[in-house]
Image (spheres, rainbow, N blue to C red):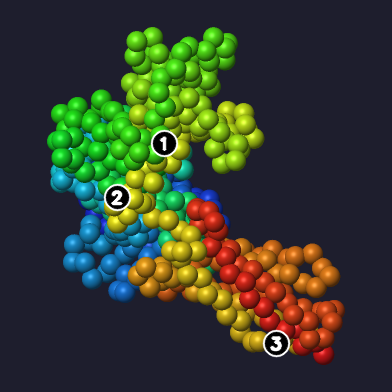
Amino acid sequence: MCLLLLAACGPLGAFGPTDSQALLPVTGTLPVDPLFKEFYQALGGQAVLGPVLTGLVEREARKCQFTEAVLMCFNPSEAESSRQYRLEPLGYGLQVQDDPQLPVPPGAGSRDLGGGFRLYDEFASLYERIYGDLYAGRPLTQVRANLETGRYEQFFENVGFYRDFNAAPGDVHLLPYGAYQCEPGCAARSEEYWKIVRSGRITQLFELTLSSAVRAGLGRPIAQPRMAEDGMFEQVYENAILYASPDDLAHIHLRPLVTWLNFVAVQPPVEKNPHEQLIFYETENGLGHNVPLFFDAFIGSLGGREQAGQPITEIFPENNGSIYRQCFENLCLDYNPAAPEGARVSLAGLGWLWLQQRDPGAVALKRFTPETVQLSLEERSPQVARGEQQQVSLLVLDRATGEPMGWVAGRLSLNLPDRPALELAVPPTGPDGRASVDLPPLDGLENMSVVEYRVCLELPDDPQVCAVDSFVYRGE
C-alpha cells in the first residue's frame, strides 16, 4: 500500500525503512541498502534506475548508494523528512551544457521547462515517472542526436534520458550516469562517457532536423552555432558549414565552403560525356560537368543538387590515385575504391580545414589524442624478483589545463620474452586522474630480463593515447 501511494501521489513523506519491509525483491549483483529500498522502488526500481553498483558510500554528511543510472543520497540533517532523500547532480560530471540564449531547435519538444529549455516529447512519460524536476533536476541541454552513441539524449542535473535511433517510439531509458561516475572500483563504460564529454559543450541547432543519412554525411558539429554577419545562424560541421534563418531553422542550407576556401582550381565547364555511369549537370549554355552516378546518389541523400551547389570540377585523382575527388561549390566528394561497399563515398573534411585556417580557437569538439592528453606511467619497483608482484600506476592529465582526467579506463599489454603478450584491463582513473593495476607474479624468465609493457587508454579518438615503459626481472 505504501508503494502504491508513493507511485500515485509522489514523495510526500520519508522513504526510510518500514517495519514490515514488504518490498519486491531487488535482483542484481548487490542488494539495495534498507535505507534506500522504498526510495529505489518508488522511482521505478531496477527497471528504471538499473542494478545497484555499490554498498553505502559516504559523501560528506550524506549516506549514498550508486545504481547504474543515479546516485541516491540520504541527508539526515534535513529537517523536512520528504527532502532527506535526493539524487545527486552527476550530470555536471559529464561536462555537458547548452547555451539557453540560442533559439530552441525544431523538434526539441512541446513542454517548456523554463530557462530556454524544452522537454523532448518522447521523454515526457519517464520524466513524469520519476516525479519530474523534483528528482530529474534542472535541464542542462535540449535533446541531442548523438551520432557516435546512435541515440537521442537529453541531460539533466541528476539523470539523463535516451532513446536509440532504431528503437521503437517510447522505448526510453535513463543514461548510466552512475556507471560512468561510480567509485573507481565499479565505474564502467568509460569510452561511452568520453564520447559524451567530447561534444558536451556544443549546442545543436540543426541535428534534429537532419535525416540520418545527411547527419552521417556531414559528420559532427565541431564549433558552437553563431549569428553570422548576414543575420543567419550557422554552425561548422566536420565536412561543411550549415546555415538557416533564425525564423526557419528547419530549412537548412550549406555555405559555399569550397569557393570560400579556394580549395581547388575551378575547371571550365565541358560538354556532356555520354558514358552510362555518368550524369550531366549543366551549368551554362549547354556546358557543365559530368558526375559519376555514385556521387549523384550521394548528393541525393544529402538533399539534392541545391545542397551541393554547382559542380566546379570533373572527377580527378587525389592522394597519388588512392581516391577520386569531385568538387562542388559547397562540398567536395571523395570516392575510395578500397573502402567497403557502402562506405566508398564520403565528404572531404573541409569544416576542419576552414576552422584551422580561419579560427582555430573556435573548435569546440574536444579531441583526445597524444597532443591533448598526457599519459604517465610508473612502476612500484624498477626490478622484481621471482614470484614478486609488480604494480603499474598511471596518471592521465589534460595537456592544455593540467587538470586530472577521471574515469579513463585502459588496456595494458605485457610483453614477456619468448612468450605471448598478456592483456590486462586497467580500471578507470579516479578523480585525481590516477589508477593502478597489479601484474601477475613472474617466473621462468631469464635473470635480468627486460619486461616491456604498453598502456593504451580507452578514449574515442584516433590515434590512440598510449605509453610504453619497462622494468627488470631480477630472477632468483
Please identify, in this view, whether the residue under mark 2 or under mark 1 is nearer the observer: 1
Residue 252 position within the rendered picture, expressed as x and y whole percent measured from the top left: 28, 28
The numbered disc on residue 358 is: 2
Marks 2/1: CA–CA distance: 17 Å
- Label 3 CA crowd tier, 10 Å (few <14, some 14–19, many 20+): some
SS category of the residue bearing label 1: loop
In percent of the image, x 34 and y 14: which residue is there? 284
Tell me the residue that label 3 is attached to: 383
Residue placed at 40% from the left, 23% from the top?
A: 268
Kindly identify which residue carries mark 1.
Answer: 264
Q: Locate residue 300: give its quadrant.
A: top left
Circle nearer the viewer, 1 or 3: 1
The location of residue 384, given as percent across then percent down, is 72, 86
Instruction: Give the Cα separation between the discs numbered 1 and 3.
Output: 58 Å
Look at label 3 and name its amino acid: Gln
Q: Is residue 30 left or right of residue 5?
A: right
Which quadrant is home to the N terminus?
A: top left
Question: Tag 3's secondary structure?
Answer: strand
